[in-house]
Image (cartoon, rainbow, N blue to C red):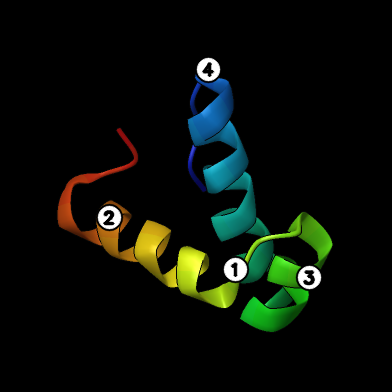
Amino acid sequence: MLHTNNLIIKHKAGLLNLAEEFKNVSRACKIMGVSRDAFYRYQELVEDGGID
């Protein structure tokens, strides 16, 4: 689970955490109002260097 105080990063981390919790990227994206493409970009950034 990812944690931060920055509101923009908090939203992105919330999306990643929600997808992990649901085990469903499409459902998390729909709830958060974010495209799947954006989700995978956020996920790649986290894998490459962390949330910040």
Q: Nearer the viewer, residue 11 or 34?
A: 34
Q: Residue at x 77, y 77 (%)?
A: 27
Q: Amino acid at mark 4?
A: Asn
Residue under numbered circle 4: 5
Alpha-carbon distance for marks 4 and 3?
Answer: 24 Å
Is the residue under label 4 in contact with that under label 1 (CB below 8 Å)?
no
Residue under numbered circle 2: 45
Farthest residue, direction left: 48
SS of the residue at dot 4? loop
Residue under numbered circle 3: 30
SS of the residue at dot 2? helix
Q: Earlier in the sequence, mark 1 or mark 3?
A: 1
Residue under numbered circle 1: 20
Q: Earlier in the sequence, mark 4 or mark 2?
A: 4
Q: Amino acid at mark 3?
A: Lys
Alpha-carbon distance for marks 1 and 3?
Answer: 14 Å
Is the residue under label 3 in contact with that under label 1 (CB below 8 Å)?
no
Q: Amino acid at mark 2?
A: Leu
Instruction: Tell me, for residue 33, which label it has, or none.
Output: none
Q: Is residue 25 visible to us here?
A: yes
Q: Earlier in the sequence, mark 3 or mark 2?
A: 3
Q: Residue at x 56, y 75 (%)?
A: 36
